[in-house]
Amino acid sequence: MIRRNSRREFLNLTVKGSALGAAAALLPAATLAASTKNETTDSLRKATNSANQGQYITVGKENGANIELYYEDHGSGKPVVLIHGYPLSGAAWEKQLPALLNAGYRVITYDRRGFGKSSQPADGYNYDTFAEDLQKLTTQLKLQDFTLVGFSMGGGEVARYLGKYGSKGVSKAVIISGVTPFLLKTSDNPEGVDASVFEQTKKAVAADRYAFFTEFFKNFYNTDSFLGKRVSEEVTRASWNIAAGASATASLACISTWTEDFRQDVVRIDVPTLIVHGDEDRVVPLAVSSQRTAKLIKGTRLLVIKGGPHCITWTHADEVNAGLLDFIQS
């Protein structure tokens, strides 16, 4: 049964010099300068990427320019792909990365288009495109026997990827604080959230996304309960900074994706699945989401984190990590 105040809580969510050879002497000075500048930029970028262990994959084009996803690939062993939530980046998996690496896994994180260090195109903010971006990443990296882990919005990628491309190469799936199976209230989905809630959220983001993020992160971490205990002011500030650097277009457009219907996707999931959710989630309430998702996937394991807010990956990292590792290793 959905808690009486679930709708209100959901609303609260609501960027060398080089010898070019004798042939360079034949180039006009302006062309040479431009070539040298481009070479310098490319070299600096490659050096920075190498230092950060970060790389880019091209997933499309916009007006002739590449749309690129930034990703990091660490460790060895069986791959685990971590998909972040709104409005953060792959860096949000800070608490899970060392636990997985220490357990002997290869860990891949990436920034969704519009967020983090990835390109910020004007379109492509829907789950079919998000799943296609993910599929291009797993294909380029030639991943096999890998686990997909999605947090919040990332849970939608896990569901749509498996629903659209199937489970070939995927060994397990994990959805944490996910937006599945269908959040919008409709005639055939009376358990959902009123459309007005999403519309008001979009208005708040369009009016002043920076102010929206400030309020959002209070409920993301349940700071009234955990500030100074399980989360610091600095963490919420760091999250705000990442969110502020996201594309304004993506920040608004992604709100509409929360109402996508994943019911037909989740019923196609045929790999062992773990669902993790906090029972004090004010962003995506447990009863509206994970409890229902668990009933649609055969053999699902549901782990409810007592007192957990939306971002249990930070506030309750030890419990989440223990459950995650136990599931992947089983």
Image (cartoon, rainbow, N blue to C red):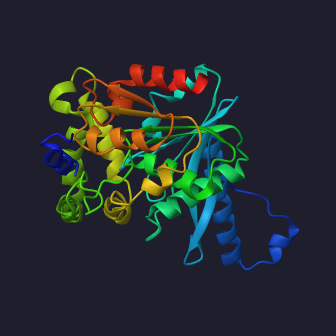
Q: Is residue 285 visible?
A: no
Expressed as whole percent of the image width and height from the top left, the position of residue 116 reads 45, 50
* Location of residue 303 (image quadrant): top left
Q: Does 221 appear above or below 131?
A: above
- Residue 109 position, x and y percent, is 55, 41
Q: Residue at x 58, y 60 (%)?
A: 132
Observer-nearest residue: 133 or 326? 326
Residue 93 place in picture, x, y as percent: 46, 35
Please indicate, yes or no, whether residue 306 appears anywhere in the rendered image: yes
Q: Position of residue 205 (x, y in %)?
A: 23, 60
Q: Quadrant of the C terminus?
A: top right
Which residue is depicted at the point 69% across and 76% down?
Answer: 31
Residue appearing at x 54%, y 25% in the figure: 327
233 on left or right of 61: left
Depth check: give the residue in front, 277 or 117. 277
How many numbered badges does the structure rendering display? 0
Residue at 69 percent across and 61 percent down: it is 39
Relative height, residue 14 to residue 95 (above, below): below
